[in-house]
Image (spheres, rainbow, N blue to C red):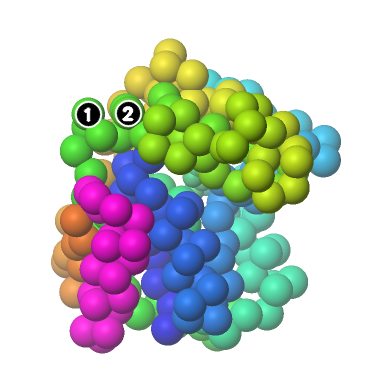
Amino acid sequence: MSFVLFGPPGAGKGTQSVMLAKHLGALHISTGDLFRAAIKNQTPLGQQAKAFLDRGELVPDGITIGMLKEHFQTTKTKSFILDGFPRNVAQAEALKTLLLEVGLKMDQAVFLEVDQAQLIERLTGRRVCKNCGEVYHVRTRPSQKEGVCDKCGGSVVQRNDDRSEVIENRLVTYEKSTAPLRDYYRESGCYFEVNGMGEMSEIFQRILKILSKK
Ligand code: AMP
């Protein structure tokens, strides 16, 4: 079972992908995580990508698709959950070609639907552990000790692109580039929608139900 989980920033793609990957034994591939790791490790890819992430803009397609291709080739997985890719129609087209090249198939594109006020509330309150990536929220899921990760003791900080001035840009970029993917996948016949509002565990069950339809 392989699928794309997509939606606006703050829809919960990352959180749900981690849970789903564990449950289904699939590989979770987050292009955002791959970029953040490259930036942290100061690789040439990280240096190319950093300014785009800081501004809340998409990294150019050539760089992003190249990175994903290399990841697929090195991990040699059979089933995958793509989180944050594709982010525009050109990337969706490139994904088709890429999957043919590596001999993989994608079963579904699942869209997580969350209203704008909830997205902003989730993004502005989100905090992450710099060390292990565990995700917190100042109101709904604070760490036990402020600024310290419950899991590994690392420092819990706000993502650079979760600052309010960048959030606005990310939402505009989403509307312009990523939202058209809904129609793209509708036309491909593999589009499914899930209500992304409510408790994490409820949303997880909704996604599992959708996945069982294929
Ligand atoms: P995310 O963690 O998915 O919210 O992604 C964080 C940032 O990484 C985005 O705002 C973009 O700057 C960059 N990024 C992640 N995935 C892609 C993609 N598929 N295409 C272009 N840029 C991306």
- Magenta span of residues: 196-214
| Picture residue at 35% right of the left edge, 56% below the top | 200
Residue 178 within the segment the image draws in magenta: no
Tell me, yes or no, whether the highlighted magenta stretch contains residue 201. yes
The secondary structure that most of the magenta stretch takes on is helix
Graded by Cα atoms within 10 Å as few (under 14), some (14 to 19) or many (20 or more), the crowding at tag 2 reads: few
The quarter of the picture where the C terminus appears is bottom left
Residue 92 falls in which quadrant of the image?
A: bottom left
Does the residue tagged 2 have its C-beta within 8 Å of any atom of ligand 1? no
In the rendered structure, which amino acid carries the disc numbered 1?
Answer: Ala
Looking at the image, which residue is at 49% across and 19% down? 163
Residue 18 visible in the snapshot:
yes
Label for residue 196? none
Q: Nearer the viewer, residue 168 or 179?
A: 168
Q: Please determine whether, in this image, residue 116 is positioned above or below residue 18.
A: above
The secondary element bearing badge 1 is classed as helix
Q: Amino acid at mark 2?
A: Glu
- According to the picture, the residue beneath numbered tag 2 turns out to be 121
Q: Which residue is mark 1?
A: 117
Residue 44 shows in this picture: no
> Compared to 16, does 205 lie above or below?
below
Horizontal side of residue 75 vs 140, given as left or right? right
Residue 174, horizontal then vertical, whole percent? 33, 36
